[in-house]
Image (cartoon, coloured by chain):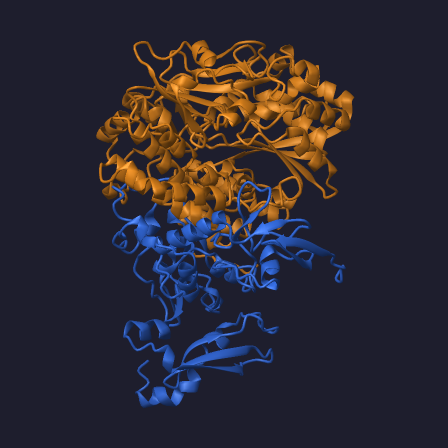
Chain colours: A blue, B orange
Amino acid sequence: MKHDVKRDVTVTIDGKPVTVKEGATLLDACKSHGVDTPTLCWAENLTPVNACRVCVVELEGARVLAPACSRKAEAGMVVKTDSPRVRLSRKLVLELLGSSVDMSLSSAFADYSKRYAAEPARFGKKLAPSAAGVRESAHPGHHTVLDGTRAETVAQPTKVDNELFVRDYDKCMLCYKCVEACGTDAQNTFAIAVAGRGFDARIATEHEATLPDSACVFCGNCVGVCPTGALMFKVEHDLRKSGEWDEKKQTETDTICPYCGVGCVLTLRVQDNAIVRVTSPSDSTVTGGHLCVKGRFGFTFVEENRRADRGGSD
Amino acid sequence: MDLRIPKDEATDAERSAVDAATADLNVDAKARRALLLPALHALQSRVGWVSKGGLYYICSRLGVPPAEAFGVASFYALLALTERPRAFAHVCDDIACLAKGADDLCREVEARLGPAAHGHQKADAHSQKGKAKASGWARSPCLGLCERAPAALVTIAGDKPADCAFGAATAAKIEAALRGKPPAIEEAYVASEGPRRLLARIGVADPKSLASYRANGGYTALKRALELGAAGTLRAVNDSKLVGRGGAAFPTGRKWEAVAREAARPHYVVCNADESEPGTFKDRVLLEGDPFAVIESMTIAGLATGSEHGYLYLRGEYPLAQARLENAIQLARSHGMLGDNVMGKGLKFDIELRRGAGAYICGEETALFNSIEGLRGEPRNKPPYPAQFGLFGKPTAVNNVETLVAVLDIVRDGAAQYASVGTSDSPGTKLFCVSGSIVRPGVYEVPFGTELGALIKLAGGITPGRKIQTILLGGAAGSFVTPEQLDLPLSFEATRKAGATLGSGVVLVFDETAPIQEILRRIAAFFRDESCGQCVPCRVGTVRQEELLSRICGGKSTLRIELPLLKDLGAAMRDASICGLGQTASTAIESAVALGLMERKT
């Protein structure tokens, strides 16, 4: 039935009763109660995968902690969101990520790290980045045993194989968001999946095919949901590389995509009168935050004159 | 779905192998997807690896996106995505074998066959390709042959693939097996004290003969279950207080009742025969020695839970069990013991055998479902539990092999008779996998409550001239106990009270010469290798734990310095990981630290 009547469910969060509709998650309950819960792999427009575990909370009577993002509220649950166990696990999740992944572009990560006093350096200095192709060549169930004096990381060269966006898996925390956006949560293209196992698990096309050789349709919805900057507009990547990226000079403007009749909301991020990033609000009823290749990347006509001035070299 | 599949061509041999494994495509998309792992196995065992052409041929046949198929294929250790020799040896270097000279064996194998195909010890071994070579090898986690350590598994791909696993492995034996001359099949050593129930037919009945099974009491339990009906069978199982023998000790009756109650259809029965816990080999002994018992007990589970379809998920490293189960299922079908009218009583039940492909994590029940469904073997978050949302999202009763086989005696003789031995909270008998520095390693059936020391004595005691340093109880996810704890009664309640666990029934005895630090590092490496990689605490935590132990083993740091980090890691993995793998990845190590085993000179 489309209009099921949903019952109220009351849970106790940090000693206070909170009532939510049946089917709501503990994260929903926390939010409605004003309890700020850290999340990294969660997004409002994607199915929760509860992989990062930074949102864990303590449930009375449960042996282990539960992920708030996906655990449904049940009547009578007694939830603690700031107990020593919760704080320790959240701190460790942040430290483990910080010690293995470049999280420098995630402001949320920086905020949480401060809140939980995370010190990724506890795990030692980082190992030198892997050469291109090394992480991809790992066989499941096997790894090279090192002396442990350097912390292993996912650091590796950026994959640049097209003009629209780059994949810098040095920054990939394996939140699965891009895979979901490429799959049934948005695009149904299935160009990428998680491959490999354990610490060698990674986001990949089949046999590491370049994106132009893969099923990718360049909708950029993976870029739109990436929380760490691992997937990035090439324009942004190049500006950052040359040191010209300057958020203080940037503005955001909402507009409507001019291509077809759907009317997708576009948020254009502009620096020096040039579009550097295109997104769509995840709460937009038209897009749910997702776009197609035209809305996402088909903006160069706006800059035609400028490009012509530069000799049309790019 | 409009799939974009690369152009690489499959060879005729690859096509025919995949076609044979995916003969029936007249099924829905989910059922087609569930043929992915069998199809990958078919390629691996026909040509020795999963080529691009072969992989993409599977994709076009099953309608699976290539990126997803690649994601699944690259999840399993037994599947090779780069070409490697058709004859390939997997040499166990896990804890039981490590204490029996596995490192020396690996060095000798390396001297004869060259560097391992997959980097494990040396960084430069990563890119080894064996194109020109006739055979290759790699190290392997526990192969479940711990009673005959060190062990090896040899796979030979071809028209008639021949796989064999054997113990007491030597480089010469491995070389002979790679040339197609495997050692003779050896049955495991089994013994018991008290009533022999689970092992009653091992070494007595011919595992290849249904007639022999019936002549030794086979199918009397199913006959009784058919008289009792589903409700009566459930009552008997409930009354017996039987709990799961895979390690989690969940009440079997409650599990079955929950499935039986669910309105959604169909229901499934799944036998978890993915025994991979280091040091565990009891299920292998049952599967190899009494395959019909597994089939009969699954049928009873089907009756009790209202399931018409059973899946038996067998770990990929058990070729002998596979052959005997395939034979037993065929015989049971042709004799009306499986099918639309079981025993002529109108019961409908059949079993499909599925093979794992080298992934410890697929022994976790929800990862096992995903593996059968053709997805990556990543555990699901619980709840929802399998009784509500199991295989293919349907109510599913998933049980360990030993648990199922225990049901036979319970149904046939009643709960009271079953409880005539054991303790009041742990009635009945239990199988223990006794290995390590012991006179007669093997599978032992003893009543619950038997003292640890008595069990070790039953196995002939410690190797003469040696003394017990420590005993690993319950497996790599279990904990260490000391020689002072030999009076520990082996029951769920007593081990729980002592802060230990029976786990999967591992009793791995280490003498004073065993390099405990090195063994702990191997346990840490095991969990790192076997983590599925889904959640942060386990994916990165197991790496950090191994690094920490490597620092201590290599003399770069001390336990004193590392202890706070080890404890924090353990707490976060235990509390915040999705599944039991991460939750128990530090248990054995922390127990060894608590006992002071780390400090001992090795």
Residue plotted at (45% across, 49% down): A89
Compared with A164, A201 (above or below) is: above
Q: Nearer the viewer, residue B190 or A191?
A: B190
Residue B9 position in % (x across, y down): 42, 51
Q: Quadrant of the N terminus of chain B?
A: bottom right
Residue B130 position in % (x across, y down): 28, 39
- Say if residue B345 shows up in the picture: no
Residue positioned most to the front: A15
Residue plotted at (53% across, 70% down): A290
Is residue A89 rendered to the left or right of residue B304? left
Is residue B188 rendered to the left or right of residue B544? right
Residue B292 position in % (x across, y down): 60, 21
**How many callouts does the rendering have?**
0
Residue B180 position in % (x across, y down): 36, 25
Q: Nearer the viewer, residue A161 or B323?
A: A161
Q: Quadrant of residue B394?
A: top right
Is residue B274 rendered to the left or right of residue B8? right
Q: Quadrant of the C terminus of chain B?
A: top left
- Say if residue A14 shows up in the picture: yes
